């Protein structure tokens, strides 16, 4: 079974957490793609009344085309549940997100949600974060100076480009630096340091955010619950 099929298994299970009347947050990425399909099927089959906020124009387009009512975060009350993918999750439920570049909107939506649930294939559960390069969203002004500061801290920043060689631009027209750190033994310390670097708009460490993780295995979904 390939990773995509495991992503679908996790997404289908996560869709069962959606309840009638909920105000939902919808993440971004290939796993969330399956989630949106599964939620939309429930809306069609069961007549669920849902309203949702999306973390990217991609997800917003897919969800509204499939009949899910989408609104702007500014017009939404506190979200009941946000379901999103992740790039790496450690055993203590800390995560790296932003592989698709949507980390800023994803973090804003996550922090405005009562509950966050992540959906991943089994390869993304790791003993320690950091093998996946940590994305940070940075403003273009002063990029070279910020890059030097990150290099001096041995954080190995690499400016993200698209497949055609052009610079990758986020929703807010910022750049992404991927930090090739290798391992992050103290994610809270690194997260706090990055929070204080002027020019860094947001980083992809999502710490103490998700309480539930649904992992897709070939044998079926597994639900992990944080002990807090
Ligand atoms: O910016 C992208 C998001 O953080 C995604 O949730 C994350 O990269 C996982 O994506 P995928 O489900 O495609 O593996």
Image (spheres, rainbow, N blue to C red):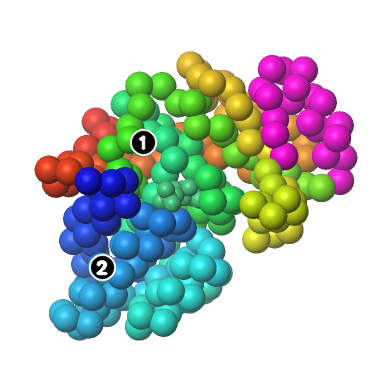
Residue 84, magenta (yes or no): no
Residue 221, given in percent of the width and then of the height, sits at 17, 46
Ligand 1 has an atom within 8 Å of the beta carbon of the residue at disc 2: no
* Number of the label disc, if any, that sits on residue 24: none
Q: Is residue 50 above or below residue 105?
A: below
Q: In the image, is the residue at mark 1 within 8 Å of ligand 1 by its beta carbon?
A: yes
Look at the image and give the residue range highlighted in magenta: 141-159
- 3 relative to 163 in the view: left or right: left
Provide residue 19's location: percent of width, then percent of height. 21, 67
Q: Which mark is residue 38?
A: 2
Query: In this view of the protein, which residue sits in the foreground, 36 or 52?
Result: 36
Q: Which mark is residue 124?
A: 1
Location of the C terminus (image quadrant): top left
* Residue 25, position as x, y percentages in the image: 41, 62
Instruction: Work out whether residue 137 or residue 123 is closer to the camera in this orientation and state it.
Output: 123
What residue appears at the point 12 percent right and 43 percent down from the top-left corner? 219
The residue tagged with tag 2: helix, strand or loop? helix
Q: For residue 200, which quarter of the picture?
A: top right
Helix, strand or loop for disc 1:
helix
Q: Residues within 10 Å of mark 2 (few under 14, many from 20)?
A: some
């Amino acid at each position: 079974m390939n990773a995509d099929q495991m992503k679908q298994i996790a997404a289908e299970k996560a869709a069962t957490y959606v309840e009638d009347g909920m105000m939902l947050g919808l993440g971004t990425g290939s796993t969330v793609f399956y989630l949106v399909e599964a939620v939309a099927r429930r809306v069609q089959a069961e007549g669920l009344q849902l309203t949702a906020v999306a973390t990217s124009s991609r997800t917003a387009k897919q969800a509204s085309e499939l009949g899910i009512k989408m609104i702007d975060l500014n017009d939404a009350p506190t979200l009941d549940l946000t379901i999103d993918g992740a790039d790496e999750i450690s055993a203590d439920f800390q995560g790296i997100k932003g592989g698709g570049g949507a980390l800023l909107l994803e973090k804003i939506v996550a922090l405005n949600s009562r509950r966050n649930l992540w959906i991943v294939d089994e390869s993304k559960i790791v003993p320690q974060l950091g093998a996946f390069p940590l994305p940070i969203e940075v403003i273009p002004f002063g990029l070279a100076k910020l890059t030097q500061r990150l290099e001096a801290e041995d954080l190995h920043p690499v400016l993200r480009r698209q497949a055609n060689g052009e610079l990758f631009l986020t929703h807010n027209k910022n750049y992404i630096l991927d930090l090739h750190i290798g391992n992050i033994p103290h994610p809270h310390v690194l997260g706090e340091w990055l929070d204080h670097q002027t020019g860094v708009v947001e980083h992809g460490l999502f710490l103490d955010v998700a309480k539930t993780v649904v992992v897709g295995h070939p044998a079926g979904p597994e639900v992990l619950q944080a002990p807090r």
